[in-house]
Image: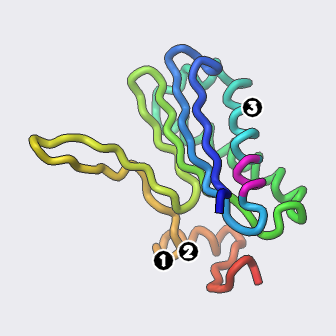
Amino acid sequence: MGQDSFDIITTEIGLNVKYIAVYDGHGIKGKEASNFAKEEIRKQLIKDKTIISGLNERTAAENYFKNIFNEIQNKFNKYYKDYESSGTCIIAVLIVDSHCFTINLGDSRAVIGAKQGANKVAYQMSIDHKVDRQDERQRIELSGGMVSSERNGK
């Protein structure tokens, strides 16, 4: 339905840094939600380019993006009526020097292709956040969320 968006950031955050992301919008206002997340993350990455260019370990990158995602969620919550039970998943790769971080929020998946001899193989780089995984369902419920088979919150 054309609800997705993407972003590629290169020189704006440093010569040694690349950020590639796909935002998978869903719901009635999925396109607006995916664009909102894209623009908010882009602004923050450019603002924090010194921090970004120094990320060299998983925990620091994970904490950085958790903070960004929480800030965006708070902004979504302020304008929840504008998004009509819509949202976005995010799958991104951040490359800093020789470090490659996969950033995932939702059920989108990142894979990387490689050749093994004459065969082409795909390596999964992320874990889908799907409610059929017991740990994911438990995480949602413990944070006050609800898992339902109903569509669009109805």
Q: Nearer the viewer, mark 2 or mark 3?
A: 3
The residue depicted at 54 percent of the width and 36 percent of the height is 20
Question: Which residue corresponds to mark 2?
Answer: 137
- Where residue 75 sits: x, y (%)? 83, 50
Task: Tell me which amino acid carries mark 2.
Answer: Arg
Q: What element carries label 3?
A: helix
The residue depicted at 52 percent of the width and 62 percent of the height is 107
Residue 9 image-quadrant placement: top right
Q: Do the residues labelled 1 and 2 touch (CB within 8 Å)?
A: yes
Question: Which residue corresponds to mark 1?
Answer: 132
Q: Is 120 above or below relative to 12?
A: below
- In the displayed structure, does residue 26 sit left or right of residue 124? right
Q: Which of marks 1 and 2 is in front?
A: 1
Task: Tell me which amino acid carries mark 1.
Answer: Asp
- Where residue 43 sits: x, y (%)? 74, 31
Q: Which of marks 1 and 3 is in front?
A: 3
Q: Is mark 1 on a helix, strand or loop?
A: loop
Query: Few, some or many C-alpha atoms within 10 Å of disc 3 (few <14, some 14-19, many ≥20)?
Result: few
Question: Which residue corresponds to mark 3?
Answer: 43
Query: Few, some or many C-alpha atoms within 10 Å of disc 2 (few <14, some 14-19, many ≥20)?
Result: some
Residue lying at the far top of the rendered structure:
15
N-terminal label among 1 and 2: 1
Task: Tell me which amino acid carries mark 3.
Answer: Lys
- Where residue 51 sits: x, y (%)? 63, 23
